[in-house]
Image (tube, grey):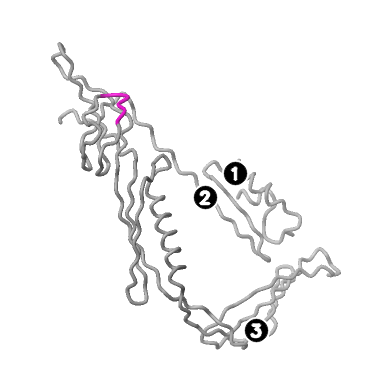
Amino acid sequence: MKLEEVGFKTGVRHHNIDLRAIENFLMIHIPELAWVGIEIRGVYAEIKISEKVPSPNRADKNIPANVVARKNGVIESIIARGGDAVVKKGDIVAEGDLLISGVLFRENIYKLILTHAFGEVYARTYYELEETHPLFKIVQKKTGNRLSEIIVFLGETEYNIGKEEVKFDKYITEKKNYEIVNCRNREIFVEAIHIEHFEVIEVTRRLEHENVREALHKVLLEVLESKVSKESEIVDTKIEFKVIGDYMQAQLWAEVIEDIGIKKQIELNE
């Protein structure tokens, strides 16, 4: 195991560990990793990783292909870098319509020419998004009743002091970690965790309509931005709010200029 190769194993004192060096070691020796992060929490280590996403294979430009619309829109501009454009500004297109043809017709040439069409086709597209948000929130309020316990780690041995069954219907737990620094035998790791369970009751609080509108507007804009590429331009938005019972509903309409072209391989039997 890669972690054991750098001495990161059960029983090791975390003060002697260079976490950043271990992260770099894993990134170098495990090529499938895109990111790794290590945090020490008490006597436990939390390791988070993210794997690399394989890059999509680039289209082989020797394979004949058309550019078609991936969604409905009104053509704003078209740049055919390969193939022949078959639409112009102002044309209304639907998903799947041909935009740039890889099938070429030329005067005095009496056979079809197949090529790999590509280019940019910008169109005005339209989005309609909807989101709801409650006009209240439930918060937890401490009653003043609580239970406490302490867990002591002496090396790899765990001792529990004052542990009781929590009989509160609802409660929250808070923890504080303490390392015992005045231990005579510094070769043994000693740590204490103070745990408190607080009884809580749930209280309903009404929210200001203006705050809810701001929250909904922010969420809808984030959703819209996640649906369009960074190269797209959001040219206009309109939002309407409606209160329905204990909820507020928001509808967002957006006009976007974006590249709607997508390549589609030409089948020779078409």
For the residue pair 68 and 179, the one nearer the viewer reads as 68
Q: Quadrant of residue 133?
A: bottom left
Q: Could you tell me what secondary structure mostly forms the magenta stretch?
A: strand
Please tell me the numbered disc located at residue 27: 1
**How far apart are the alpha carbons under marks 3 and 2?**
38 Å
Disc ID at residue 70? none
Q: Is residue 141 magenta?
A: no
**SS class, disc 3:** loop
Residue 75 in picture, x, y percent from top left: 26, 37
User: Quarter-wise, where is residue 150 in the image?
Assistant: bottom right
Q: Where is residue 47? Give x, y as percent.
A: 59, 56
Q: Secondary structure at mark 2?
A: strand
Residue 171's spot in the image, x, y percent? 55, 82
Residue type marked 3: Lys
- Per the rendered image, the range of residues in magenta is 78-83
Q: Is residue 62 above or below residue 54?
A: above
Contact between labelled residues 1 and 2, with CB atoms less than 8 Å apart: no
Instruction: Using residue 256 as the reference point, say whether residue 39 is left or right of it.
Output: right
Neighbourhood count class around disc 2 (C-alpha, 10 Å): few under 14, some 14–19, many 20 upward:
few
Label located before the other in sequence (3 or 1): 1
Query: Relative to 89, is 113 above or below?
Result: above
In the image, which is nearer the foreground, mark 3 or mark 2? 2
Residue shown at 25% from the left, 42% from the top: 73
The location of residue 170, given as percent across then percent down, is: 52, 83
Mark seen at residue 50: 2
Outermost right residue: 184
Quarter of image, res 258: top left
The kind of residue tagged 1 is Met
The residue shown at (21%, 40%) is 93
Q: Earlier in the sequence, mark 3 or mark 2?
A: 2
Residue underneath mark 3: 163
